[in-house]
Image (spheres, helix red, strand yellow):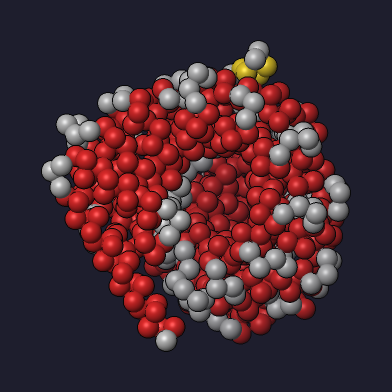
């Protein structure tokens, strides 16, 4: 019986809706207006009614009425209000409106400057702008300037609030930030901070924070902007006081954080160290709402990310570590992600802070769980947290081994995660992997057994330079003081063709790590002869390629150091002595203006001329013929102490020749 009544009620609703929807298309303005008012009243507060009228295809008609300049203004007003109500419905309702071009139509109507239409249009646009799909809406200079014109101190509070919210959504990147700054938004919006109404000032502060995010030029303009004669940073310092609403404190703290990170404020500025940081730490505490704590933690992570002093101050403040650990228990993905980000920032540089974080009860369990979380943002935040904590030498030897954190990392990197991992996630995961493969890490051996060499070798061919870098970097760490069988495996998996490609990489960091890898492969001396016997010509060719390239001294220094290692091998050094071109290059670098190249070249000569080695007399004789001794004697006049001592030692080797 109940089901029958529900069906009957639904039928009657549809029939009633049809009756006044038919009038929407009437040429009689009175009927049309009456129809819109009925539709408006029926959809307010009811998603079911919204869905019903949208399903009957009235959105195009409402939009047509809104932009029709020839009809009664009251009809247009009610159309705007009705559209605004529909925009507060379900996701699909809002997407339909946005995809129908509603935002642009409203912007066009605002250009008419009809005072009666401005408020309903701004309210509707504010609602639409807060939906993710609004990112497709384009705001040009003309539309942004028009919106800003409604943010005058004499305008209504509603207008001011709407404009601030819309501009925040419109400010998506450097282009919009620059436009807003150019048309005078910093001064216009900062002036409105004096309005005694938080429904205006909170959106204003949020908009200012968005405008200066990662934009040094806009940030520099904002710090010199004033409100009531007070510069913006100092005024924001007032707004983060405890007696202000939490949303205001958070908004002001975020704005100050963005100003600092954009270079407009120093980390030593009291407004940053003694006002912004303590405010964020306080708002992370358990006695605040979860949403506020999450936003405070995320902002704190950004504030402390690159400054070790701020990290140290935050870490000892008000039981912050415990408060962040508690956030990891929250069901909200935003809260857990923010906590991971904050831990990543706090532990970026200081070993003692990392130890405090890792020693927190169940923390590492939470991190490991986060690595396998279904939410990709949580996975990324957890990986970054792990990367930060993996910089701890002591914890690599103990805690990380106990929790086998390498397993979920390997799963991420081998495509076993719940969805296709982004390059950002892969980069963060491979960065953490680099640390886990350091020589002293117990995780190294089980990872080798699970095929990490093949994984990393494949990564070096990735189109993303960050992944290529991490792949080579991890192999370099893996090869340091490794067994010869592992070094041979690395060379086999990589292949000489790929090594040549890496040596020709456009990214200097990739090239440097590749040279570091080769340097590890041809040392210590016990491995040098074997590796060169198998791959000598290719390695020499790669070194010469780098030496002949237009690279800076620090790159060529690494190449000469490889020659120094080769010169240490009993048979491997023949690859140098039999190569006239390489010998001449060594001599040229002995007199190079860069001291680092001189020192590394002399180091190589030292290994070639070392006494007590088979064939030393012949090598010394050949080097003397090439003028090496004369050059060494000239270098005794150097003011570089390190070079002088090295030259003096090498000359002693030739003394009895």
| Of the pair 181 and 393, the residue shown nearer to us | 181
Q: Is residue 281 left or right of residue 384?
A: right
435 to the left or right of 576: right
**Count of numbered labels shown in the rendering:** 0
Q: Is residue 333 left or right of residue 543?
A: right
In the image, what residue occupies the spot 68% across and 50% down?
292
Residue ID at (36%, 72%): 9
Is residue 5 positioned above or below 209 on the image? below
Q: Give the residue at the far bottom of this rendering.
A: 1
Q: Is residue 62 visible?
A: yes
x, y percent for residue 196: 64, 26
Name the residue rendered at 19%, 51% in the picture.
23
Whether residue 530 appears in this view of the structure is no
Indicate whether 331 appears above or below 129: below
Residue 568 image offset from top left, x and y in percent: 64, 62
In the rendered image, which quarter is residue 544 located in? Answer: bottom left
Q: Quadrant of the N terminus?
A: bottom left
Residue 607, position as x, y percentages in the image: 66, 57
Asked where in the image residue 177 lies, by quadrant, the reply is top left
Q: Residue at x 55, y 62 (%)?
A: 377
Q: Nearer the viewer, residue 384 or 6?
A: 6
Front-most of residues 651 and 393: 393
């Amino acid at each position: 019986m109940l089901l029958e009544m529900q069906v009957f009620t639904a039928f009657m609703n549809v029939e009633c809706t049809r009756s006044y929807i038919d009038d929407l298309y009437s040429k009689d303005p009175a009927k049309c207006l009456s129809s819109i008012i009925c539709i408006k009243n029926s959809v307010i507060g009811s998603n079911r009614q919204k869905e019903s009228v949208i399903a009957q295809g009235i959105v195009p008609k409402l939009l047509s009425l809104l932009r029709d300049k020839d009809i009664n203004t009251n009809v247009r007003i009610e159309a705007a209000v009705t559209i605004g109500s529909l925009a507060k419905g379900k996701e699909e309702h809002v997407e339909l409106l946005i995809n129908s071009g509603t935002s642009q139509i409203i912007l066009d109507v605002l250009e008419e400057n009809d005072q009666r239409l401005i408020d309903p249009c701004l309210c509707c646009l504010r609602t639409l702008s807060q939906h993710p799909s609004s990112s497709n809406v384009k705001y040009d200079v003309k539309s942004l300037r028009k919106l800003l014109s409604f943010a005058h101190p004499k305008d209504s509070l509603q207008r001011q609030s709407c404009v601030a919210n819309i501009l925040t959504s419109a400010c998506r990147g450097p282009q919009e930030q620059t436009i807003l700054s150019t048309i005078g938004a910093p001064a216009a919006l900062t002036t409105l901070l004096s309005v005694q109404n938080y429904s205006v000032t909170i959106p204003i502060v949020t908009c200012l924070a968005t405008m200066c995010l990662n934009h040094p030029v806009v940030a520099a303009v904002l710090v010199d902007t004033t409100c009531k004669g007070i510069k913006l940073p100092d005024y924001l310092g007032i707004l983060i006081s405890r007696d202000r609403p939490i949303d205001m404190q958070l908004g002001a703290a975020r704005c100050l954080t963005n100003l600092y990170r954009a270079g407009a404020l120093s980390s030593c500025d009291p407004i940053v160290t003694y006002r912004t940081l303590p405010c964020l730490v306080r708002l992370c505490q358990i006695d605040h709402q979860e949403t506020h704590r999450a936003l405070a933690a995320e902002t704190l992570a950004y504030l402390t990310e690159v400054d070790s002093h701020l990290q140290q101050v935050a870490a000892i403040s008000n039981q912050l570590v415990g408060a962040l650990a508690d956030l990891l228990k929250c069901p909200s993905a935003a809260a857990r992600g923010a906590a991971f980000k904050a831990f990543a920032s706090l532990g970026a540089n200081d070993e003692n802070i990392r130890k405090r974080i890792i020693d927190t009860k169940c923390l590492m369990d939470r991190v490991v769980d986060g690595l396998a979380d279904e939410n990709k943002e949580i996975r990324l935040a957890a990986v970054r947290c792990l990367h930060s904590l993996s910089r701890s030498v002591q914890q690599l030897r103990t805690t990380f081994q106990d929790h086998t954190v390498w397993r979920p990392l390997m799963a991420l990197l081998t495509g076993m995660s719940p969805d296709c991992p982004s390059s950002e996630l892969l980069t963060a995961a491979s960065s953490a992997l680099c640390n886990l493969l350091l020589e002293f890490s117990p995780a190294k051996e089980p990872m080798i057994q699970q095929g990490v060499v093949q994984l990393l070798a494949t990564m070096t061919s990735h189109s993303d330079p960050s992944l290529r870098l991490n792949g080579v970097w991890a192999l370099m760490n893996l090869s340091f003081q490794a067994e010869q069988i592992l070094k041979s495996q690395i060379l086999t998996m990589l292949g000489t063709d790929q090594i040549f490609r890496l040596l020709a990489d456009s990214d200097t960091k990739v090239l440097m790590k590749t040279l570091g890898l080769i340097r590890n492969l041809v040392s210590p001396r016990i491995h040098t002869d074997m590796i060169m016997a198998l791959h000598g010509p290719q390695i020499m060719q790669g070194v010469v390629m780098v030496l002949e390239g237009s690279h800076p001294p620090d790159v060529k220094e690494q190449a000469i150091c490889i020659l120094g290692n080769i010169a240490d091998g009993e048979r491997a050094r023949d690859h140098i002595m039999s190569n006239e071109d390489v010998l001449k290059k060594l001599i040229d670098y002995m007199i190079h203006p860069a001291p680092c190249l001189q020192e590394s070249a002399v180091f190589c000569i030292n290994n070639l001329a070392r006494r007590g080695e088979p064939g030393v007399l012949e090598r010394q004789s050949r080097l003397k013929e090439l003028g090496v001794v004369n050059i060494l004697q000239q270098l005794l006049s150097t003011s570089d102490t390190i070079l002088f001592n090295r030259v003096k030692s090498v000359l002693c080797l030739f003394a009895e020749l």
